[in-house]
Amino acid sequence: MAAPTLDAARIGVLTFPGTLDDRDAARAVRLAGGEPVSLWHADADLHGVDAVVLPGGFSYGDYLRAGAISRFAPAMGAVVDAARGGMPVLGICNGFQILTEAHLLPGSMVKNDHLHFVCREQQLVVENASTAWTNQFAQGQTITIPLKNQDGQFVADDRTLDELEGEGRVVFRYVGQNPNGSRRDIAGITNERGNVVGLMPHPEHAVEAGFGPDAADGVRAGTDGLTFFTSVLASLVRA
């Protein structure tokens, strides 16, 4: 099969019962120049997509714990196999929780340390600009994208945290206030290969001027989130 082009890359957006941000993620893919493809949790066929986004929400109502039921959905079996084969996969908020439950990423997500839902514009520093989803950022760049979560505290044992740090697999860190108590201010991580990335903030809500966070060039003008999606399209062209 020919390598995807920016115009032809097909990015699957996986919907579970309780998913909230699938349409936002699909719009982000479209604005970046890709073709969004709707995927359903009960369908094990990924329909030939080139990458997958697991969007935010409350899959299966977050019963048991966030993402715990979703990992057993038929579609996730296909996602796990594809990710292990190198397909780019992005987990946003609830999607990040699902990736940890599916053991595609280490650690776990628990309730915020203050036990409250938090919604704010959040600054992040880009610690790893070489993943499939961050290669269009600059190392050390500070970006601003919205954050909204209740179970957003990333936890892991010290050995795992040391491995993530030592292997350069911390992708984003919170700047300024840590909004949820995540260990070592970690906002997002990647797997060893760099094709799977999970983060708690929502890049799909910062892709179009007039609808994103406030920025230096205007109110609600921030579009830092769009770079996640142009990055994956660029990585697919190079593949």
Image (spheres, grey):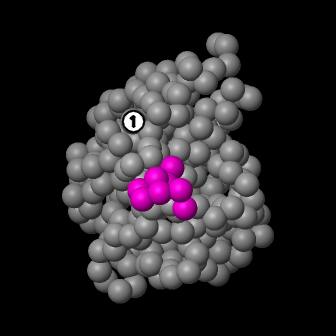
Residue in the image at 63% along x and 40% along y:
231
Write the start and end of the magenta stretch as one range: 216-223
Q: Quadrant of residue 51?
A: top right
The x and y percentages for residue 12 are 44, 32
> Which residue sits at x=63%, y=64%?
142
Extreme residue in the right direction: 166
Q: Looking at the image, can residue 181 be seen?
A: yes
* In-front residue for pair 75/140: 140
Q: Quadrant of residue 180?
A: bottom left
In the image, is residue 181 above or below residue 232? below
- Type of amino acid under label 1: Ala
- State yes or no: residue 219 in magenta: yes
Callout 1 secondary element = helix
Q: Above or below — where is 137 with respect to 163?
A: above
Residue 199 visible, this orientation:
no
Where residue 146 appears, x then y in whole percent?
Answer: 42, 61
Q: Residue at point 61% right, 32% down? A: 233
Q: Residue 160: percent from the left, percent from the top?
A: 65, 72
Residue hosting label 1: 26
Tell me the crowding category of disc 1: few under 14, some 14 to 19, or many 20 or more residues within 10 angstroms, Cα based: many
Q: In what quadrant of the picture does the N terminus appear?
A: top right
The image position of residue 118, as x and y in percent, is: 34, 74
Depicted 172 relative to depicted 155: above or below: above
Q: Main secondary structure of the magenta part?
A: loop
